[in-house]
Structures are given as C-alpha cells and as structure tokens.
Image: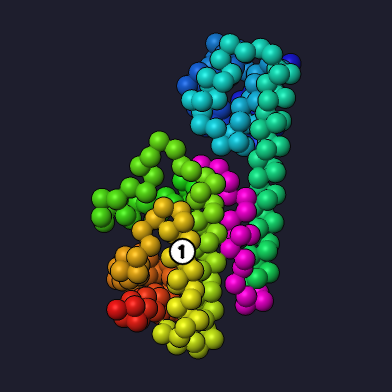
C-alpha cells in the first residue's frame, strides 16, 4: 500500500507542511519519491509517524524524537515505553486536575484553600521551572537575580515552602477581608508563625528582613500585582502589618 502525502495528512490529522518538514530534517522519510516528485508512504512509515506523534503528545522536541528513534526497529518495545510515559503523564494530569477542581470549589465558596493541597500535582522540576518562569524572568531583567540558578530544583522543599507561603498569604488575605486591623495580635501571630517556619528551614527570619521583603512586594510592580490579584490591598496590608510588628518589637 502506498499513500500520498495528502492522504497521510488526512489520515494522521497532521498538515502536509508538517510531513514535508519531517522529511526535510530526516525524521520521517517517505518510502518512495516518484519521478514526478510525489512522496509516497507505506505501512512502515505510518507506524513511525504514529510513534513520532506519541512522543509529540509527550512534548518531546523533534531533535530528541529523532535521537530516540534512530536505528530502532523494535516497535513493540518503543510502544511500551511510550505507554508508560503517557500513563505517567495521565497520572500527573489527573492529580493536577483534581487540585484544580478543589481550587475552583474553594474559590466558589469564597474560602482560602488549604496550602497543603494547593500545589498537589506540581511535583517535578519541569513543573516548578515553568511555574517560576515569569517571576524569574522579571527578577533577572529587573534585578539580575536568577531564582533557577542552581544545578537542581529541590522539589520537596519547594513544595513544602510553597504550601506554607500559600497558607500564610491566604490567612492574611482572610484577615484583611474580615476587617482585622493590620496591628492586631492575631495578624502578628500569623507573621511570627511564618517567620518561625522560615527559620526552621534555614532562611533569614528577622522581622527587619521580613519588613524589607514586604516593602519590596509593595513597591515592585510584578509582585504587587501578584498579591493584589489575590486580594485587593493585600500588598499594603502585609507591609503595614510587618512594620507594626517590628515597631512593637522595638
């Protein structure tokens, strides 16, 4: 059986341009090119295209797919490997979807979500790198600071810190919505609990450092928008609460 490039395009739901590109880069050559220049594909080429498309669903770049398939004819083994990769992706997406559904439900109830549940499913380096990409780009361009300038992202630590930070910010936002004054003891307790967590995890936990951080959040456009997107006035409330707690300590 020989199929034209147009027939393969319609069968596999890819564009003719894509098939031409795969041929050009040596990823998928047709079984035959006629004297008139028509590309023809057989069963073997359709099987290879299927494997390519499985890898594309897994977000593999074309050059990596080319390397993975180079010289391999053991179709059964390749398909089993792809099945395992897709099952992992499904499990991960399932966990993220569940977290998303819980987040929607909490938002509809107008309640802060448990910080321990908010980041369930974001458990790999790639997910964290993607989550931090915009913030990291802003910090690099504006201040020359690279959040991802390390050999390895410590996923468990980031998960724990993110969950605690989310819980802290949610409680601060709730206090603001409830009309609790920024210098109330309840707010002070929230900040002290947050600083104790940071200290246990090896981060500076002096109230002076926290005040500087909250002032930065209030003055920096990117971080102020992040906080104001969670609750209007939160950036200013947080800074005022930190300054009040420092003043009380003095």
User: Does 171 appear in magenta?
Assistant: no
Q: Judge by depth and name the residue closer to the eye, 24 or 71.
A: 71
User: Which residue is tagged 1?
Assistant: 196
Q: Is residue 81 left or right of residue 68?
A: right
Residue extent of the magenta highlight: 108-125
User: Does 111 appear in magenta?
Assistant: yes
Q: Point out residue 187 in the picture as x, y percentages from the top left corner.
A: 47, 79
Q: Residue at x 47, y 21 (%)?
A: 25
Q: Judge by depth and name the residue closer to the eye, 70 or 194.
A: 194
Q: Judge by depth and name the residue closer to the eye, 160 or 123.
A: 160
Quadrant where the C terminus sits is bottom left
User: How would you classify the magenta stretch by its main secondary structure?
Assistant: loop
Q: Residue at x 36, y 58 (%)?
A: 204
Does residue 232 sit above or below 204 in this rendering?
below
Quadrant where the N terminus sits is top right
Q: Point out residue 200 in the picture as x, y percentages from the top left corner.
A: 46, 56
Q: Point out residue 130 in the picture as x, y percentages from the top left corner.
A: 48, 48
Q: Residue at x 62, y 50 (%)?
A: 121
Q: Residue at x 45, y 85 (%)?
A: 184
Q: Point out residue 126 in the picture as x, y percentages from the top left corner.
A: 51, 42
Query: Which of the 4 image quadrants contains residue 7?
Result: top right
- Furthest toward the left, the residue is 143
The 10 Å Cα crowd at callout 1, few under 14, some 14 to 19, many 20 or more, is some
> What element does badge 1 sit on?
helix
């Amino acid at each position: 059986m020989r199929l034209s490039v147009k027939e393969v395009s319609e069968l596999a739901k890819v564009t003719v341009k894509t098939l031409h590109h795969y041929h050009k880069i040596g990823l998928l050559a047709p079984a035959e090119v006629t004297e008139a220049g028509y590309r023809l594909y057989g069963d073997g080429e359709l099987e290879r295209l299927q494997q390519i498309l499985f890898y594309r669903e897994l977000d593999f770049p074309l050059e990596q797919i080319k390397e993975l398939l180079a010289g391999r004819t053991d179709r059964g083994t390749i398909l089993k490997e792809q099945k395992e990769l897709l099952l992992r992706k499904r499990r991960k997406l399932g966990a993220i979807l569940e977290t998303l559904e819980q987040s929607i439900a909490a938002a509809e109830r107008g309640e802060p979500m448990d910080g321990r549940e908010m980041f369930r499913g974001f458990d790999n380096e790639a997910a964290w790198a993607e989550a931090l990409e915009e913030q990291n780009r802003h910090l690099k361009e504006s201040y020359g600071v690279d959040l991802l300038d390390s050999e390895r992202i410590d996923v468990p630590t980031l998960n724990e810190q993110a969950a605690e930070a989310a819980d802290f910010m949610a409680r601060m936002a709730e206090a603001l919505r409830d009309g609790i004054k920024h210098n109330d003891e309840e707010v002070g307790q929230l900040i002290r609990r947050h600083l104790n967590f940071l200290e246990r995890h090896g981060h500076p936990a002096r109230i002076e450092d926290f005040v500087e951080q909250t002032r930065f959040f209030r003055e920096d456009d990117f971080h102020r928008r992040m906080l104001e997107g969670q609750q209007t006035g939160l950036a200013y409330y947080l800074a005022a609460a930190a300054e009040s707690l420092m003043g009380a300590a003095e």
